[in-house]
Image (cartoon, helix red, strand yellow):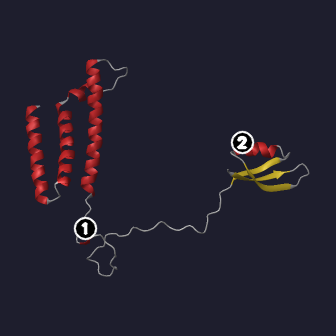
Amino acid sequence: MPRFSYALRLPDGSTEHGIIDAPDVLSARAALAEMSGDIIELMATVPPIEKTHTPPPSPPWHLVDEKKADKPKVKNVPPSVKNTAATYVPVTTTIRLYAGWLLAWYFLIYAFGSYQFTKALPFEIPYLDEFFLSPTILSFTFAAFLFLLLSSVHTLIGKGLVKGILLIVLGAVLVIVFRQNV
């Protein structure tokens, strides 16, 4: 149950300080009102932090940059990580995130547009007909889907420069063929 510290001014003019247990502030005020005094201060108290708190355990291993000799080596590194260089390519991840949001936005355009094409919507969305019937929006939808698909395939078959270039060429050919047929 929460605890509240209080200060009361009693009818004789003296001040009383104390702590009261109550489920909420209103209950604490009601209990203090029964003590026939004016409430000067009422605050929720925070329990003291125990000194036995231990920090969370560190991970059993982390990547070590082998090029920097002045840093100590880390023990207990899994064998799958020992001989690999850590690479971080945030550009691909960021583009995948934006392509996913763009694809979700296009899905909403096609969902509302197809509904409006068959029935009237109870509200009006400006430019919905133009976006829904636009071959350019359809091409961008296909390109965003294709990018997400081929980047996932690139991750599944094992990343590599040659595989990446082949997938880029395949994607470009598919977009060109799609654009010629739309």
46 or 39, which is in the foreground? Answer: 46
Q: Residues within 10 Å of mark 1 (few under 14, many from 20)?
A: few
The residue labelled by disc 1 is 80
Name the image quarter holding the C terminus: top left
The residue labelled by disc 2 is 26
Q: Residues within 10 Å of mark 2 (few under 14, many from 20)?
A: few
Question: Residue 22: percent from the left, percent from the top?
Answer: 72, 47
Question: Residue 175: percent from the left, percent from the top?
Answer: 12, 41
Question: Residue 163: percent from the left, percent from the top?
Answer: 12, 56
Is residue 127 visible in this depiction of the protein?
A: no
Judged from the image, the secondary structure of the residue bearing numbered disc 1 is helix
At a point 25% along the width and 49% down the height, the residue shown is 95
Say above or below: 79 vs 140.
Answer: below
Q: Is residue 52 left or right of residue 175?
A: right
Circle 2 or circle 1, nearest the eye: 1
CA–CA distance in space, label 2 to label 1: 59 Å
At a point 10% along the width and 58% down the height, the residue shown is 162
22 or 169, which is in the foreground? Answer: 22
Q: Give the amino acid at mark 1.
A: Ser
Q: Is residue 62 left or right of residue 39?
A: left
Q: Residue furthest bottom?
A: 70
Judged from the image, the secondary structure of the residue bearing numbered disc 2 is helix
